[in-house]
Image (cartoon, rainbow, N blue to C red):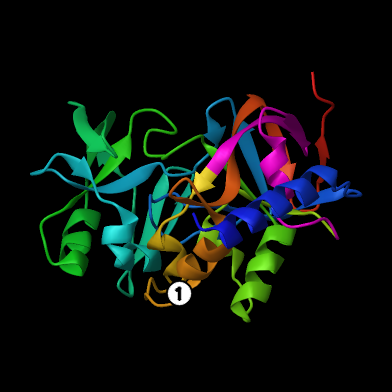
Amino acid sequence: MNDAVLNRAVLNRAVVNDAKPSVMRVREIGVSALKGGRHRPRTRIALSALGPVGDRVFAVVDLADGRVLKTVEHPSLVGCDARWQCGVLSISIDGQQISGTPTTDATPLTLDYWGRPVSMRNVRGPWSPAFSRLLGRPVALARVDFPGEVVYGDTVTLATTSSLERLARESGTPVDPRRFRSTFTIDTGEADAHLEDCWAGRELEVGGARLLVGAGIPRCAVIDLDPHTGARGAGLLKILADYRLDSGEIMFGVYARVVRPGLVGRGDPVRLLPAP
């Protein structure tokens, strides 16, 4: 890290630690039933002890290689819009809407996801052939055995409007929050950018739930994909690296895990609890 970037990082952290926002609220909620699929807005969501209910239940996998496909390597997945309601799975794949009640194989599969094993089951139905045509290779649709299996870090992710506004200023263009695929985008009012950095190890009350905030989120080229089509080219990762590079990682937003399940809706208050 060069001296200019280091000085900016130190200054940012100092400002963040001194910032005292007024009332914070949930601005946006987003999840995707399909790992890597289009991030869909929600007005309300239930958080269980294992994370957002209905989030990343299914994933596209390569059975021959024994691994879950990565979004950054298969950006066309971002254009796939999945809905999972009342036992019916509906996915728009390359303009074709495919709906049905998925059934899974009895025998579980152990697949690789970013270097760790996850337990999944192959889904029978019309989705796998459609995904194979989209990606031009044999793939399958699989369902996780346990919530959170195909989540890179903790099951909840948080971004703030202050940090998004900073990136918009740096890039000179509005930034669609869906690029960061956050569970919750929190309206932090006039607070300084990256206020969330100092929440690590603290608890947040978010609507009817409580979260324990963890580490920052290292970002990759997924943020440069159009959140509706998956087309590459925004160039935001490079801009973000100019002022958020830390020990080789480009950080934006924070992870969190659920310590008290509950319902969270758009507009609900967010409160940082006193440090223990």
Picture coordinates of residue 107, whole percent (x, y)? 17, 26
Give the amino acid at mark 1. Answer: Gly
Picture coordinates of residue 252, whole percent (x, y)? 57, 53
Circle 1 packing at 10 Å, graded few (<14), some (14-19), many (20+), is: few
Residue at image position (38%, 71%) is 230
Picture coordinates of residue 202, whole percent (x, y)? 72, 29
Residue 40 in the image: above or below residue 87: below
Residue 103 in the image: above or below residue 40: above
Residue at image position (27%, 62%) is 74
Inspect this view and state whether residue 53 appears.
Answer: yes
Instruction: State the residue lying farthest toward the front.
Output: 3
Picture coordinates of residue 84, whole percent (x, y)? 45, 49
Instruction: State the residue lying farthest toward the bottom.
Output: 172
Residue nearest the observer in this picture, 238 or 228: 238
Secondary-structure class at tag 1: loop
Image: magenta residue range: 190-216
Residue at image position (71%, 53%) is 12
Q: Quadrant of residue 79?
A: bottom left
Residue 172 in the image: above or below residue 245: below
Q: Which residue is mark 1?
A: 235
Residue 188 in the image: above or below residue 198: below
**Magenta stretch contains residue 46:** no
**Magenta stretch contains residue 202:** yes
Residue nearest the observer in this picture, 35 or 240: 240
Marks counted in the figure total 1
- Is residue 237 found left or right of 190 in the rendered image? left
Q: Quadrant of residue 68?
A: top left
- Is residue 222 found left or right of 198 in the rendered image? left
